Image: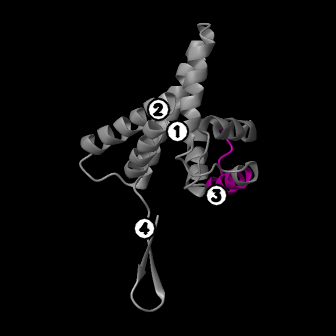
Amino acid sequence: MHLDVHMGGPCLRITFIMPLIDQVQKDMVAAMKARQEARLSALRMVKAALMKQKVDSPKPLDEAAEMAVLKSLIKQRIDAADAFRKAGRAEQADKEEAERKLIETYLPEGATEAELDAALAAALAETGVTSLKQMGVVMKAAQARIQGKTVDGKALSDKVRAKLQ
């Protein structure tokens, strides 16, 4: 969000990043005005989860905590969609998938395959791990190298497992 301030001379531009809760609230208002019930419901759920984390945590929410909340919500949606598909409730599974896609729009862009491979190679070289028993060490090092990008933990885990076998 930008705020332009004119003081008789050149334009001074003040830029600040809107906190995630405020962005979700703004999107909720837009969804209400557009009468998008499904989107509004998902946004309310996201806001409730963020507010709960804010109340439960003694320190203010930082970006990492917000991303952790969003990732847990996405994981819940994926698990619920799988459960609904197994139960033969495709309509409910589709609703969960739509919510997951909406939540993912608030996450930073995902790491590419090349970035994943590079981070994994660097993590393996750095840790010197050759055994599958020490997979966690490699996972932690690889995730640290691609911090700030969204990474599917299962995909990364599969890649690490393939390299160590």
- Residues marked 2 and 1 touching at CB (< 8 Å): yes
Could you tell which of marks 1 and 4 lies nearer the N-terminus?
Answer: 4
Counting from the top left corner in percent of width and height, residue 41 is at 44, 30
Kindly report the distance in space between the C-alpha atoms of the residues bearing marks 3 and 2.
41 Å
Mark 2 crowd level (few <14, some 14–19, many ≥20, 10 Å Cα)? some
Residue tagged by mark 2? 42
**Residue behind mark 4:** 16
- Of marks 3 and 2, which one's residue comes earlier in the chain? 2
Image location of residue 78, percent across then percent down: 57, 26
For the point 69% across and 50% down, which residue is it?
116
Say which quadrant the C terminus sits in.
Answer: top right
- Residue wearing tag 1: 103
Mark 1, mark 3: which one is toward the viewer?
A: 1
Mark positioned earlier in the residue sequence (1 or 3)? 1
Q: CB of mark 4 within 8 Å of CB of mark 3?
A: no
Which residue is identified by label 3?
Answer: 126
**Tag 4 and tag 2, C-beta contact below 8 Å:** no
Element class at badge 3 = helix
Q: Is residue 48 left or right of residue 135?
A: left
The reply to whether dot 1 and dot 3 touch (C-beta < 8 Å) is: no
Q: CA distance from mark 1 to mark 4?
A: 22 Å
| Residue at (64, 48) in percent of width and height | 110
Task: Point out residue 23 in the picture as x, y percentages from the top left corner.
Answer: 43, 50
Question: Which mark lies nearer to you, 4 or 3?
Answer: 4
Calculate the distance from the C-alpha at mark 2 to the C-alpha at mark 1: 8 Å
Q: Quadrant of residue 85?
A: top right
